[in-house]
Amino acid sequence: MIKSINGWRAVFALMIVLFHVGVMGLEEMTWAGVTFFFMASGMLLAMKYPFKQLDGGSYKRFAWRHAAKLFPLHWLVLALWLVVMALAGVLFIKPLALSLNVLLLQSWSLVHSIYYSYNHFSWFLSTLLFCYLCYPLLARWYMPLRLRYRVIILAVLTVIVFGILAATGGDDYNRTALYVFPPMRLVDFLLGMTLADVVGHCRQWRWLGRGENGTDAELVAIALLSVTVFSCQAYDWLLPWGDTMMWWLPVLVILLVSVLYHKREGFVGKLLSSKPLQWLGNISFEIFILQGLALLLYNYLLAPVMSHIGLLDVANEVGADLFGISGNRLLTICLVLPIDILLAWAVNRLFTRPIAKRLI
């Protein structure tokens, strides 16, 4: 395991949750985080499963192994989501949307009310499943090509993605549909796969990855990420590309630095490799998927109780005086993340690990 990548998983997962609970200014880091998850998955799979030869049996074993990582967790969270909504008295069953959710096909719909239906964040699992199922074929037929040909293919795909996103004109509805659409995210995944091979070429260069530690390179990666964040915030004309391809370069650099300086991490890498971030990184998958359930538990079960005993009134005073926000928003920011982390730890310990031992 490359610890700095695992640490980045934790950082991005936490920022995504904090943005969704109302912390302002983190939207761009949310976009970067989603891109990171897809690209890192492609790179790590290419490093672990080269698939020099592919037959029906090996494909089935790979597909089963990776589908088993997604479906049980998804079904558990969906069932819990339905139970909480039913207890809150706000459950509405939409047969088509529910059927697509059960099958992890919802992200193929370009309809907002379907791909974001029920557990809002399960679109990620739907799209990731498509990437997993494509991986053996890409590893067998794309990866053996010479690097120059793969770069040409990626350049063509970049032009296509650029044009498709430009055609949206920054329209939120169309951008969001493309944001979750599996073929669009497959390009992120493919970039990560290609990076796994690029790393080997980079190691042959005397000037790259040869330092005693990666502090300088890590700071360059963070600087590039920061510049991209500020650019997206400052220039509205970047909006069509701001939630997808704008993050390709900074994420590629982050991943490249993480691999090249593996076991020679600098200050940033050592921080990312610390035990708290490694623990959070190990449950980051659950943190991401369970954040919607954590919000439901707070909004429909916890918040009414706090309002009944007067805690919400106290929070309103504190929030207005110190932060200029409502008490409910203040409590949401303070409480949902701990709830989410606790849920993620419990699900990982009591469900994900036992299921993995049985099925994988």
Image (tube, grey):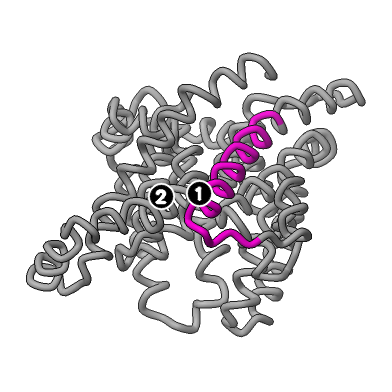
Residue occupying image coordinates x 74% and y 57% = 183
| Residue 183 vertical position relative to residue 191 in the rendered view, above or below | below
Element assignment for label 2: helix
Badges 2 and 1: C-beta atoms under 8 Å apart? yes
Q: Residues within 10 Å of mark 1 (few under 14, many from 20)?
A: some
The quadrant of the rendering that contains the C terminus is top right
In the foreground, 312 or 121: 312
Say which quarter of the image contains residue 49.
top right
Give the label on residue 297, or none. 2
88 in the magenta segment: yes
Residue occupying image coordinates x 58% and y 31% = 200
| Residue 273 vertical position relative to residue 287 in the rendered view, above or below | above
Bounds of the magenta segment: 68-92
Residue position for label 1: 84
Tell me which secondary structure the magenta stretch mostly adopts. helix
* Residue 180, visible in the rendered structure: yes
User: Can you give x and y, in whole percent of width and height, for residue 73 in the image?
Assistant: 60, 35
User: Can you give x and y, in whole percent of width and height, for residue 166 in the image?
Assistant: 64, 79
* Residue 198, visible in the rendered structure: no
Q: Amino acid at mark 2?
A: Leu
Say which quarter of the image contains residue 330.
bottom left
Q: Residues within 10 Å of mark 2 (few under 14, many from 20)?
A: some
User: Can you give x and y, in whole percent of width and height, for residue 37 in the image?
Assistant: 53, 45
Residue occupying image coordinates x 68% and y 63% = 158
Element assignment for label 1: helix
Q: Amino acid at mark 1?
A: Val
Q: CA distance from mark 2 to mark 1?
A: 7 Å
Q: Point out the residue furthest to the right here.
A: 56
